[in-house]
Amino acid sequence: MAKSKVQKQEIIDKVVEKFKTMKSAAFTSMSGFTMAQADDLRKSAKESGVEIFVAKKSLLAIAAKEAGLENVDPNTFEGSILTAVSYDDEVSAAKILKAFTKKNESFVFAAGVLEGKGLTAQEVTQLASLPSKQELLSKMVGSLNAPVTGFVNVLAGNLRGLVTVLDAVAKQKTA
């Protein structure tokens, strides 16, 4: 059943709001998508704070233009388009779709958006291979903590050596 102009405008308004508040988005061309796959994708996306939706390319194009996204024209994408939008992390939308494309070859990256600028399919693939914000923060904390841990181990080593010497002297005097 065809949608009325009011229904189409409501969809455009929702998508514009998503595009304005997102950190990144990834678009994939999909075909042969089963409900079991859809449920699996929605579940993994929800766990990562990513929103997944499907909209007509013409409505996506209007929404992208209204949201001020540069170099993004969904009308040039092939096939049906699934959109993943991330509000918290710049790489999570691309990561979710990349993991899903490994299981389903019928999914192919079409394009993406990062900080309001359009990305090619290759750039989205590269973005998906970057570590997430949480991974980078944990690596940074580990790097900051390493010198302190080393210093503590050096100090503990000196104390262990002192205890060993004192123990040897005590054993020698009792013998």
Image (cartoon, grey):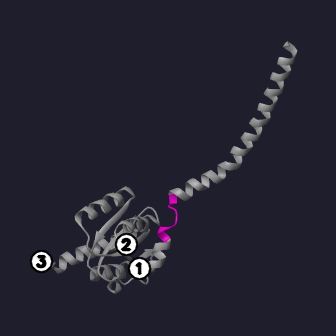
* Relative image position of residue 156 (x, y in whole percent): 74, 35
* Magenta stretch encompasses residue 121: no
Residue 115 in sight here: no
Query: Which amino acid lies under the numbered mark 3 shown in the image of this protein?
Result: Met
* Magenta stretch encompasses residue 132: yes
How far apart in space, not on screen, are marks 3 and 2 (Cα)? Answer: 27 Å
Please tell me which residue is depicted at 35% across the width and 58% down the height of the picture: 44
Please tell me which residue is depicted at 23% across the width and 77% down the height of the picture: 9
How far apart in space, not on screen, are marks 1 and 3 (Cα)? Answer: 30 Å
Residue 153 in sight here: yes
Element marked by disc 2: helix
Query: Which of labels 3 and 2 is toward the front?
Result: 3
Please tell me which residue is depicted at 36% across the width and 69% down the height of the picture: 84
The tag on residue 169 is none
Label 1: few (<14), some or many (≥20) within 10 Å? Answer: many
* Relative image position of residue 73 (x, y in whole percent): 37, 84
The quarter in which the C terminus is drawn is: top right
Sooner in the amino-acid sequence: mark 1 or mark 3: 3
Residue 59 falls in image quadrant: bottom left
Q: Which residue is mark 3?
A: 1
Contact between marks 1 and 2 (CB within 8 A): the answer is yes
Depth check, front residue: 40 or 87: 40
The quarter in which the N terminus is drawn is: bottom left
Q: Which residue occupies the extreme front position in the image?
A: 175
Q: Which residue is mark 2?
A: 19
Residue 46 falls in image quadrant: bottom left
Label 3: few (<14), some or many (≥20) within 10 Å? Answer: few
The tag on residue 69 is 1
Label 2: few (<14), some or many (≥20) within 10 Å? Answer: many
Q: Which residues are magenta?
A: 127-133
